[in-house]
Image (spheres, rainbow, N blue to C red):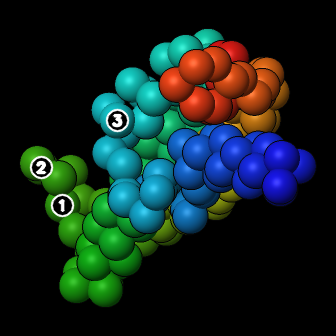
Amino acid sequence: MKKSLVSLLILASLAMVKGQQLEFMNSQNIMQNGKKLTKLEVYEIMKEDNEALKVYKNGKNLRTIGDVSFFSGLAIGATGLIIDLTNGGDYEFGNYNHKESNFPKVMMATGGALILFTLPLKIIGKNKIRNSVNLYNESKEKTEPITKISLLNNENGFGLRLAF
């Protein structure tokens, strides 16, 4: 009876620690106990683990730079394509006529290069966010909520003493 009760309490304490862990869904969605967390909530939770928070912020910054670069490249490339398709290569800026200019092609190449530049940034950022969640969870697993369980008895009955 005593062994089964102690085993039950140990399992319950491990379940409490497991329930406090973060779950990585993707770089935008981090969950805890089935609830999607905002970026500020993740900062608040990770503030006790400086290394995990540092890696998380670095990953988020890389993802943000990747997103800005992607949409900038998309806009520049689309603008070059529109200029090339609508004017057939004949267009003017001010009084200068740019017949047979490579300007639209350069814009499309620049946009494509920016889009390709974003791929490694977004992948590295996602991996850093995943690693930060793993670092946080590993640090939570190392801390055991209940370190000692003992059975006590006195004139009123018996009970369990849990040491944290």
Residue neighbourhood size for the residue with mark 3, other residues' Cα within 10 Å, grouped as few (<14), some (14–19), many (≥20): few
Q: Between label 1 and label 2, give the one nearer the viewer.
A: 1
Q: Could you tell me the amino acid type at mark 1?
A: Glu
Q: Could you tell me the amino acid type at mark 2?
A: Asn
Asked if the residue at tag 2 contacts the one at tag 1, i.e. Cβ–Cβ closer than 8 Å, the answer is yes
Q: Residue at point 70% right, 45% down? A: 9
The single residue placed furthest to the front in the displayed view is: 155
Relative to 9, residue 99 above or below: below
Instruction: Say which element carries label 2.
Output: loop
Name the residue carrying label 2: 95
Query: Can see residue 19?
Result: yes
Residue 105, image x and y in percent? 49, 67
Quadrant assignment, res 4: bottom right
Q: Between label 3 and label 1, give the one nearer the viewer.
A: 3
Q: Between label 2 and label 3, give the one nearer the viewer.
A: 3
Name the residue carrying label 3: 41
How much space separates mark 2 and mark 3, taking CA atoms?
A: 55 Å
Instruction: Say which element carries label 1.
Output: strand
Asked if the residue at tag 1 contacts the one at tag 3, i.e. Cβ–Cβ closer than 8 Å, the answer is no
Q: Quadrant of the C terminus?
A: top right
Query: Which circle's residue, 2 or 3, is located before the other in the chain?
Result: 3
Name the residue carrying label 1: 92
Residue 107, image x and y in percent? 44, 59
The single residue placed furthest to the left in the displayed view is: 94
Question: For this rendering, which residue is in front, 75 or 81?
Answer: 75
How much space separates mark 1 and mark 2, taking CA atoms?
A: 7 Å
Say whether residue 144 is left or right of residue 104.
right
